[in-house]
Amino acid sequence: HRANLINFGILPLIFNDPADYDRISESDSLLFSGIREQLAVGKPVTGTVRKSDGSEFSVKFTHPLSARDIELILAGGRLNCK
């Protein structure tokens, strides 16, 4: 599935703490600030979950992306690359 996500420009992120997944509801928003600057091989990505009640909490993600994968993601995916 990872390759398909990359092809469409979608980040294949993995929760550092699997318990964070259970803290998120479908009405919550996941926000990333400076995602382009955060993406680097082997480095975690930090996001903020904004709950429907207005509260927020931070989450950290890992990713299995190579330098080429990151380049493709930032270009909008393989399907957008020429």
Image: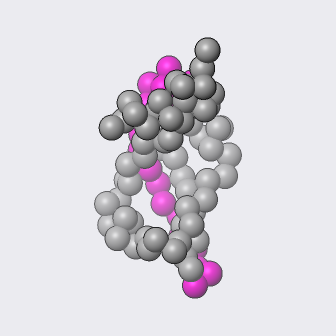
Q: Is residue 34 rendered to the left or right of residue 59?
A: right
User: Could you say which quadrant of the image residue 48 lies in?
Assistant: bottom right
Residue in the foreground of this view, choosing between 46 and 11: 11
Q: Quadrant of the image for the N terminus?
A: top left
Q: Is residue 70 rendered to the left or right of residue 24?
A: right
Q: Which residue corresponds to the image point at 61% horizontal and 53% vertical from the top-left?
A: 32
Q: Which residue corresponds to the image point at 44% horizontal and 50% vertical from the top-left?
A: 61
Query: Is residue 64 among the parts visible in the rendering?
Result: no
Point out residue 78 in the picture as x, y percentages from the top left corner. Answer: 52, 24
- Residue 31 magenta-highlighted: no
Point out residue 11 in the picture as x, y percentages from the top left corner. Answer: 49, 41
The structure's colour scheme is one colour
Furthest toward the bottom, the residue is: 53
Point out residue 72 in the picture as x, y percentages from the top left corner. Answer: 55, 25
How many marks can you see?
0
User: Could you say which quadrant of the image residue 3 lies in?
Assistant: top left
Furthest toward the top, the residue is: 82
Residue in the foreground of this view, choosing between 61 and 3: 3
Over which residues does the magenta segment extend? 53-71
Point out residue 50 in the picture as x, y percentages from the top left corner. Answer: 58, 71
Q: Which residue corresponds to the image point at 68% horizontal and 46% vertical from the top-left?
A: 34
Query: Is residue 50 among the parts visible in the rendering?
Result: yes
- Residue 68 magenta-highlighted: yes
Q: Which residue corresponds to the image point at 55% horizontal and 61% vertical from the top-left?
A: 30
Q: Quadrant of the image for the C terminus?
A: top right
Residue in the foreground of this view, choosing between 49 and 72: 72
Task: Say if 22 sits above or below 81 in the image.
Answer: below
Task: Say if 1 sits above or below 75 in the image.
Answer: below
Q: Is residue 44 rendered to the left or right of residue 71?
A: left
